Amino acid sequence: MAAERPAALLTYFALNYLGAVIVPINTAYRGGVLEHVIRNSGAALMVADGRLLDRLKGIDLSALRRVVSIGKPPTPAPA
């Protein structure tokens, strides 16, 4: 689940080189749809854009062993 950025393309090629099966996830997915896709992918590792990590909050990620972030998550606005 990575937005268009050079690191995402590099990650795609690196995973392909390692022989990993890549399951692209639409960056517009949220909530139950995102949870369903993750659960049914059979993936143990998720590589996600740091700007999209907040979409993983509140969904079941127990099928994954690890979530790796590409880039930094957005900084919260000052209160």
Image: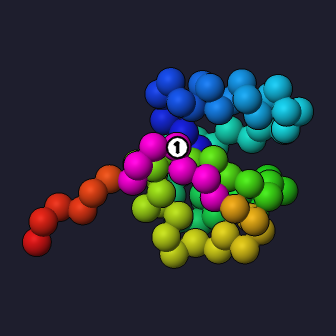
Q: Nearer the viewer, residue 63 or 20?
A: 20
User: Is residue 45 depicted above or below 57 in this figure?
Assistant: above
Q: Which residues are magenta?
A: 67-73
State the image coordinates of residue 63 (x, y, percent, origin top left): 77, 68
Q: Residue at left 32%, top 53%?
A: 74
Q: Secondary structure at mark 1?
A: strand
Q: Is residue 37 visible?
A: no
The answer to whether residue 21 is visible is yes
At x 27%, y 57%, the residue is 75
Query: Crowdedness of circle 1 by 10 Å Cα count: few (<14), some, many (20+)?
Result: many
- Taking depth in this image into account, of 72 and 56 the one nearest to the observer is 72
Q: Residue furthest left?
A: 79
Q: Position of residue 60 (x, y in %)?
A: 65, 74
The total of numbered circles placed on residues is: 1
Magenta region includes residue 12: no
Quadrant in which the N terminus is drawn? top right
Type of the residue with mark 1: Ile
Q: Which residue is mark 1?
A: 70
Location of residue 7 in the rendering, given as x and y in whole percent from the top left corner: 53, 30
> What residue is rendered at 79% in x and 58% in y?
44
Q: Quadrant of residue 21?
A: top right
Q: Is residue 8 above or below residue 78?
A: above
Left or right of residue 13: residue 33: left
